[in-house]
Amino acid sequence: MAGGWSRDGAVQDQIDASVEDAIELARSQLPKGESLIHCEECNAEIPEARRKAIVGVHLCVHCQNELDKAQTKHDDYNRRGSKNSQLR
């Protein structure tokens, strides 16, 4: 059932687009190439088990955790769902 100015399925289209964007972002952040022996950030040795488990790893566990924390702080805002973007 459509309501107001929206067509049938418009909400689901927004949900699908948000999910596709999140998947694309996650895939773009996957490591590529050969794994490094030492971390790019702190120069600590990356354990062999980590290098084998994650192909193309460039960061040690500690630096990767810090990077993940920094990225999640900025990803909480959903621009598609904001009221201001819908009013413009």
Image (cartoon, grey):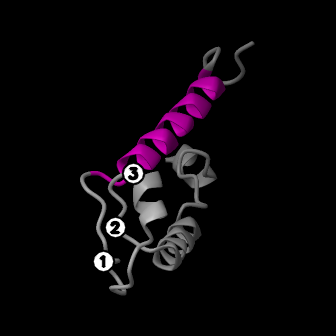
SS label for mark 1: loop
Bounds of the magenta segment: 10-32
Q: Main secondary structure of the magenta part?
A: helix
Kindly report which numbered mark, 3 or 1, lies closer to the viewer in this rendering. Answer: 1
Q: Locate residue 38: give its quadrant.
A: bottom left
Q: Which residue is mark 2?
A: 58
Depth check, front residue: 36 or 15: 36
Give the answer, above or below, for where 29 lies relative to 44: above
> Can residue 38 be seen in the rendering of this structure?
yes
Q: Position of residue 20 (x, y in %)?
A: 49, 34
Q: Locate residue 77: give its quadrant.
A: bottom right
Disc 1, disc 2: CB below 8 Å? Answer: yes
In the rendering, which numbered label is found on residue 57?
Answer: none
User: In the rendered view, does 37 fall on the left or right side of 9?
Assistant: left
Mark 2 belongs to which amino acid?
His
Q: Which residue is mark 3?
A: 30
Mark 1 belongs to which amino acid?
Glu
In the rendering, which numbered label is found on residue 40?
Answer: 1
